[in-house]
Image (cartoon, helix red, strand yellow):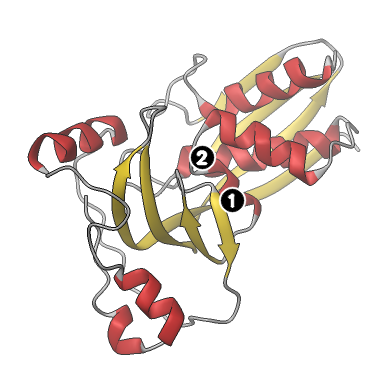
Amino acid sequence: MEKIETLSLAKINFGLEITGLRPDGYHELRTLFQTINLSDWLVFRLRIENKIRLSGDLSAIGWDESNLIYRAALTLKQETGSQQGVEIEVKKIIPPGRGLAGGSSNAAVTLLVLNRLWDLKLPAGQLLKLGASIGADVPFFFYGGLCFGAGRGDRLEPLPGLLAGWLVLVIPDFTLSTSRVFKEYDAISPSLTSSSKESKIIQFLTRQDRSLFRQLKNDL
């Protein structure tokens, strides 16, 4: 196999509750992740030389090592010692900087596809750990669908069949840095502990009451 083409889905959050600050600098949170049918298109071509090449529309996300596609491929090579190469063509549809996690989705897809294209045979658990080392949202995209997320968002529980329907996605014409958003939140919000407020997300999951779903909010 020398070529694999695949979609890379965006996600939204049905509610996000920040419950505290972790010793590692990340925030403790609870959220409901949901993949949606807005997607990028990635094409992976096996190359003989030991290089990672990116092509396509990368003007909005960069060509350097800050690109999560590149980081995912490099992380996999460092983990396995693989000497194989790849060219990854990116057809970017998901707008960056809008909270849709296109970069994290691209990273997860890259780990999954290259594990197959390079015939590395890494188990799913190892790929999940590599994904978490790249970004907190990356592990979710190994599951997709609807998931409850806790911790950094990387402790995940799939919730198949709980929700179904249509939504209207409104995308602003400006971008926001995730790290800056969290810093601004810390500056204006009181100190939180995991027990400092009642969780609407937990109530919804426990009772599965649609009226509670409509009350879910994003603390950010």
According to the picture, the residue beneath numbered tag 2 turns out to be: 104
Secondary element under disc 2, as helix, strand or loop, is helix
Q: Residues within 10 Å of mark 1 (few under 14, many from 20)?
A: many
Secondary element under disc 1, as helix, strand or loop, is helix
Residue 77 in sight from this viewpoint: yes
Residue drawn where x is 84% and y is 17% of the image = 82
Q: Quadrant of residue 128?
A: top right
**Marks 2,1: beta carbons within 8 A:** yes
Instruction: Give the number of the disc on residue 118.
Output: none
Q: Position of residue 21 (x, y in %)?
A: 31, 38
Against 100, residue 70 (above or below) is above
Residue drawn where x is 83% and y is 14% of the image = 81
Q: Quadrant of residue 24?
A: top left
The answer for how far apart the CA atoms under marks 2 and 1 are is: 8 Å
**Side (left or right) of 167 relative to 141:** left
Q: Residues within 10 Å of mark 2 (few under 14, many from 20)?
A: many
Q: Position of residue 170 (x, y in %)?
A: 25, 61
Residue 92 in sight from this viewpoint: no
Query: Which quarter shows the N terminus?
Result: top right
- Residue type at the position of mark 1: Phe
- Residue type at the position of mark 2: Ser
According to the picture, the residue beneath numbered tag 1 turns out to be: 141
Q: Position of residue 4 (x, y in %)?
A: 78, 42
Against 53, residue 219 (above or below) is below
Residue drawn where x is 76% and y is 20% of the image = 79
159, 174: nearer the viewer: 159
**Side (left or right) of 30 relative to 135:** left
